[in-house]
């Protein structure tokens, strides 16, 4: 997409620059070539392909049924994230840190206690808003064990800049120990 | 007034069709029509596709109705035809998602 | 004494603004007011620019302690609000007010007093926001004011009220100006200027103004609802009580996306006007461009949800808006290639305005390309609310609006000042602005993709954003220096340049067919137009018009006369006699302002007083127009004759009311949308308590509406319909007073109160207008007997009975069915 964009930009700039070159009497003034070709057909073709591609990808990113999915609740408030999920012995609540198993899909149910916030872990998925009175579910998945940074993407007041959290993706052993109540 | 309205009628119809399809999609999800099966596609999808086909048909008819007589130089008449063609193509393009995308998720 | 000089003196006596403070306050002249609007808007631009510099100063280094988050939040909220509402829109409005009558061959706009009222409202509303800033209580919830952050519990101070009330005050100015512009373009043109001979700029402004009439009402509605929630606890956006913050987002972006095109189209109109002159040719594909503008006008209303891709809307709904968002790039592409083709067809010269247009091309195309990227849903899920979007929107708005307006400044400055451009500072300013801008915002794309969100006041040093931000800030200050040079350049032009010759660029449009700077009446006589570029065939048109060799060349009865034409063909329709200088606009704006100030101070019990004052002034406003003596057909030159507007059915006043009511209808439609949206989507519905239905009250109201609809239609009798409306009024008030649940208990009650209140207000207004016309008839005014006034009253009666009955039935039906 970036390369395509750059190519179009170069094309337009070149056409613009070439318009200023000194020329003889013969000039191209065909409405059909400029407007129909350049203005209609050229963008339509590119945009239709881009749209179709975007929709296919978008559809694939939607949460699908998967028996291995685990579900956590992310509760946003000003200015704290609290995560809750079932462990071996009842719910585990973890403020500021979300624990997930690596390599398994995780559905994050987003709730807010006050204003709109947005849950965003750039390396794991796109962002989704937590909106009062609505229940949004975001599917994330970490390929590798490790630590990922997350933040609130929707402006939420004075503490917005510091409204972040961490995601720890565990390997199998770490996950088992977390669920048992250890860290 | 009337020639002005005619010269944008195709675009107005696009706006109506676009709003109708979006409203039906929202309503279907609120009322759970997505879950009602009709053999093949769900009730929601069937209504959406029907709305789409009706809109496209009306706009196609409008294009035919407003086709300018050959050699006309009446600017507003040509504009009316152009706007109905734009309306038709836009409706076809913006409504296509009704055929295969997830309706309520 | 030459003929031209004699005419000049005679017209100047009729159209001129008297010296002294009274003249300054009472003028309704479009040139004066257009310049005032532009100067005020530029002042706001400089203030907004200073705020931008403060933002960049804060972000230049990580962990900056320059401003605390409370101040920083005010800075970016005010920067966005000022640039959008107090700079961009008033700037092009001022430009259109100044330029349109001149391009169309008219002597003023259709509603000169409205022009003045619009400027005063803008000035007072904008000043409210500046006062808030000086007091340190500026709005701080972001320029799109998302609820519930902007609601009372999370913004308890007066900050948000300043935004809601100040911006709504300014929007009044936008609506009246839009009506003024639409009617002027459709009616007040030179004879012979059919729609397809209109300068392209007029087409652009026609579509822009129509879009304002459709696009602004949702925002005004949203602001009113949010202010009602903040002031009286009516829970439209409070999820606990059946409200929904998403309703705000829908209403805001229903306005907010068309807004981008509302800002871009006038600038594109400027490009389409200047570019062919710079290339010494005509525009390529006039008809194609008109089609593209119309398509843009409509399609841009199908994009608003693309600002809401991350709120959890189903993928199919996102897909509709993603499709429309890519589609809208096509008419834009048509224009870009029409411009490129025009340059190829002509022999372009790199004069100063052209240089700024090149800046426009490069910047705007980049903004358009990133726009297509964020229209792709999965990409937006990443880029949304990051610095990438900040960069994109600045490329679009700065590239698509500021660069063309800078080009316009250098192109038309001589027109305003009567002096010729004679310095080279403008070139240096261009390079500083261009390089500074791209340095600032190109880097923001990258740092946004690296994950920097919008609206953060600080960031950690170890995250890798530091270098980009520092360079961005440097670029920001380079841009600021460029604008400093631009201001110096302007001042030099104003005070220190030689006089210009007529039509210095060799352009073909009518604004150059007059003395420079233009006299108060623009042209001593109106031309007959047979071509899109009348000056091409008749380079000496300015002189012949000044000598009175056109229509309406003889001053008559001290009237401010100009011609109205038939909309499509441009055939002469009637003579418009425009109102002269008056203090009424100022008084009306002051009383309007009193309402907003009382609301701000929380003196709600007193707030109705100025509203009654506005109604009284409105009565006076209409009453002082027209006379009691019919004139019949009057000569207008070339052996033609026409009636004055008071004696025709299709007067500008009638057209103005049609378009005002279209905007009003959009407002009502948005309200119905809100009602349906809350009912189907919002949490905590259905409400605990429905309205108590009453068949007698419903029957009285519907019967009243039917009487108003059916009686007196053919003979334009008004007393019967007014009586019917009175019954409808009683039914509406009884419903809201006796039957509806409390507006504070649940969003249902709150929506019903607004719906029924809206109906009652409009029914009351229609009754007032009906009574007005009855009184005018009794007093023997021509416009109320031969003219359009009964027709206008009928229009209002029909509108009021339709909306009133819809409100009444819409409130009763769900309860009756339950």
Image: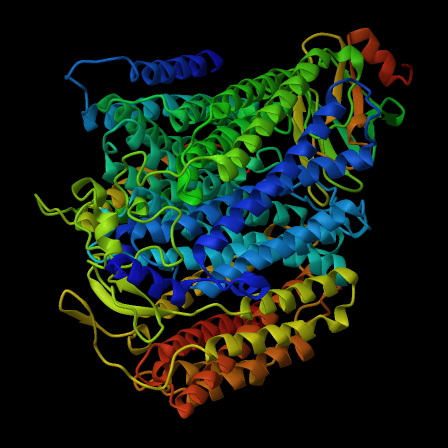
Q: Where is residue C207 drawn, in percent x and y?
A: 38, 48
Where C81 sits versus C792, above or below? above
The front one of C605 and C322 is C605
Seen as rendered, the residue at the extreme bottom is C778
Left or right: C93 with respect to C222?
left
What is the x, y in percent for residue A77? Answer: 81, 36
Instruction: Name which residue lies at 68% across and 33% down.
Output: C50
Q: Quadrant of the C terminus of chain C?
A: bottom right
Name the residue at 36% across, 18% down.
A12
User: How far across and how far down the image is residue C67, in percent?
Assistant: 81, 30
Q: Is residue C202 above or below residue C569?
A: above
**In the current view of this chain or complex, which residue is farthest to the left?**
B71
Taking depth in this image into account, of C468 and C485 the one nearest to the observer is C485
Residue at the outermost front position: C1
Residue nearest the observer in this picture, C63 or A167? C63
Q: Is residue B57 left or right of residue A181?
A: left
Is there any visible trace of residue C312 in the rendered image? Answer: yes
């Amino acid at each position: 997409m970036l390369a395509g964009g750059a190519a179009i930009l170069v094309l337009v700039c070149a056409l613009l620059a070439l318009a200023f070159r000194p020329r003889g009497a013969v000039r191209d003034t065909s409405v059909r070539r400029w407007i129909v070709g350049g203005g209609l057909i050229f963008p339509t073709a590119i945009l239709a392909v881009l749209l179709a591609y975007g929709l296919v990808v978008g559809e694939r990113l939607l949460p699908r049924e998967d028996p291995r999915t685990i579900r956590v609740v992310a509760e946003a408030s000003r200015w704290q994230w609290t995560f809750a999920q079932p462990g071996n012995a009842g719910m585990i609540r973890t403020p500021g840190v979300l624990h997930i198993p690596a390599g398994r899909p995780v559905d994050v149910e987003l709730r807010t206690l006050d204003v709109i916030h947005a849950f965003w872990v750039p390396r794991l998925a796109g962002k989704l808003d937590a909106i009062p009175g609505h229940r949004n579910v975001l599917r994330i998945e970490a390929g590798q064990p490790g630590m990922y940074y997350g933040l609130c993407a929707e402006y939420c007041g004075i503490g917005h800049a510091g409204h972040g959290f961490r995601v720890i993706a565990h390997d199998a052993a770490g996950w088992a120990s977390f669920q048992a109540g250890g860290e | 007034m009337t020639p002005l309205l005619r010269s944008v009628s195709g675009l107005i119809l696009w706006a109506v069709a676009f709003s109708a399809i979006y409203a039906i999609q929202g309503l279907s999800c609120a009322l759970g029509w997505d879950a009602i099966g009709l053999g093949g596609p769900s009730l929601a999808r069937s209504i959406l596709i029907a709305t789409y086909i009706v809109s496209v048909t009306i706009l196609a008819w409008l294009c035919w109705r407003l086709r300018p007589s050959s050699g006309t130089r009446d600017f507003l008449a040509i504009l009316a035809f152009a706007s109905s063609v734009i309306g038709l193509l836009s409706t076809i393009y913006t409504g296509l998602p009704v055929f295969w995308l997830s309706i309520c998720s | 004494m030459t003929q031209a000089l004699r005419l000049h003196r005679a017209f100047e006596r009729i159209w001129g603004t008297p010296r002294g403070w009274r003249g300054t306050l009472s003028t309704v002249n479009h040139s004066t007011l257009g310049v005032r609007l532009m100067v005020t808007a530029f002042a706001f631009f400089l203030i907004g620019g200073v705020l931008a510099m403060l933002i960049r100063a804060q972000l230049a280094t990580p962990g900056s302690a320059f401003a605390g988050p409370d101040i920083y939040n005010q800075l970016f909220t005010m920067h966005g609000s000022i640039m959008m509402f107090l700079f961009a829109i008033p700037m092009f409005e001022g430009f259109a007010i100044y330029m349109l009558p001149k391009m169309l061959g008219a002597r003023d706009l259709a509603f000169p007093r409205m022009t003045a009222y619009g400027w005063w409202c803008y000035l007072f509303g904008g000043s409210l926001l500046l006062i808030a800033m000086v007091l340190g209580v500026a709005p701080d919830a972001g320029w799109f004011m998302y609820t519930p952050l902007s609601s009372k519990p999370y913004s308890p101070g007066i900050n948000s009220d300043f935004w809601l009330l100040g911006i709504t005050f300014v929007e009044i100015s936008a609506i009246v100006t839009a009506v003024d512009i639409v009617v002027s373009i459709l009616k007040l043109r030179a004879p012979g200027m059919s729609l397809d001979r209109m300068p392209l700029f007029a087409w652009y402004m026609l579509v822009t103004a129509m879009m304002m009439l459709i696009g602004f009402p949702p925002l005004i509605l949203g602001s009113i609802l949010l202010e009602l929630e903040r002031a009286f606890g009516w829970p439209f956006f409070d999820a606990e009580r059946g409200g929904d913050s998403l309703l705000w987002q829908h209403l805001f972006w229903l306005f907010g996306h068309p807004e981008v095109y509302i800002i871009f189209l006038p600038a594109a109109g400027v490009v389409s006007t200047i570019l062919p002159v710079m290339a010494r040719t005509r525009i390529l594909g006039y008809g194609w461009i008109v089609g593209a503008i119309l398509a843009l006008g409509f399609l841009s209303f199908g994009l608003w949800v693309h600002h809401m891709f991350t709120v959890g809307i189903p993928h199919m709904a996102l897909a509709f808006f993603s499709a429309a968002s890519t589609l809208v790039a096509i008419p834009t592409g048509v224009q870009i290639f029409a411009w490129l083709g025009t340059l190829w067809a002509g022999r372009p010269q790199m004069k100063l305005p052209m240089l700024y247009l090149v800046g426009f091309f490069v910047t705007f195309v980049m903004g358009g390309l990133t726009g297509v990227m964020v229209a792709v849903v999965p990409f937006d899920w990443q880029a949304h609310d990051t610095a990438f979007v900040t960069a994109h929107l600045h490329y679009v708005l700065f590239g698509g609006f500021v660069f063309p307006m800078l080009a316009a400044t250098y192109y038309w400055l001589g027109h305003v000042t009567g002096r010729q451009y004679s310095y080279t500072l403008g070139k240096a300013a261009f390079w500083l602005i261009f390089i500074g801008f791209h340095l600032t915002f190109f880097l923001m794309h990258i740092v946004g993709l690296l994950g920097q969100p919008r609206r953060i006041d600080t960031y950690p040093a170890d995250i890798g954003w530091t270098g980009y931000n520092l360079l961005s800030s440097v670029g920001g200050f380079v841009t600021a220096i460029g604008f400093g040079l631009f201001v110096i350049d302007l001042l030099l032009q104003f005070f220190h340049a030689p006089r210009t010759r007529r039509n210095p660029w060799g352009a073909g449009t009518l604004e150059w067919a007059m003395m420079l700077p233009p006299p108060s009446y623009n042209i001593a006589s109106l031309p007959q137009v047979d071509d899109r570029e009348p000056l091409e065939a008749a380079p000496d048109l300015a002189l012949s018009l000044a000598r009175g060799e056109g229509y309406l060349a003889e001053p008559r009865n001290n009237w401010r006369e100009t011609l109205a034409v038939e909309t499509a063909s441009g055939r002469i329709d009637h003579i418009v006699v425009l109102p002269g200088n008056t203090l009424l606009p100022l008084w009306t704006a002051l009383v309007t302002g009193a309402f907003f100030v009382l609301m701000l101070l929380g003196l709600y019990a007193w707030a109705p007083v100025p509203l009654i004052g506005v109604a009284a002034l409105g009565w006076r406003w209409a009453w002082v127009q027209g006379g009691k003596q019919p004139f019949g057909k009057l000569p207008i030159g070339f052996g033609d004759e026409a009636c004055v507007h008071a004696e025709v059915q299709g007067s500008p006043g009638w057209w103005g009311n049609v378009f005002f009511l279209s905007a009003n209808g959009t407002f009502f439609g948005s309200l119905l949308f809100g009602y349906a949206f809350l009912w189907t989507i919002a949490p905590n519905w259905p409400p605990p308590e429905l309205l108590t239905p009453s068949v007698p009250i419903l029957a009285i109201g519907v019967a009243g509406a039917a009487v108003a609809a059916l009686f007196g239609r053919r003979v334009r009798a008004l007393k019967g319909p007014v009586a019917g409306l009175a019954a409808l009024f009683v039914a509406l008030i009884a419903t809201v007073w006796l039957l509806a649940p409390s507006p504070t208990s649940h969003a249902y009650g709150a929506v019903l109160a607004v719906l029924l209140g809206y109906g009652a207000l409009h029914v009351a207004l229609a009754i007032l207008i009906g009574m007005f016309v009855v009184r005018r008839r009794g007093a023997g005014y021509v416009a109320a007997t031969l003219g359009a006034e009964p027709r206008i009253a009928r229009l209002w009666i029909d509108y009021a009975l339709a909306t009133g009955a819809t409100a009444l039935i819409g409130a009763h039906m769900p309860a009756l069915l339950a």
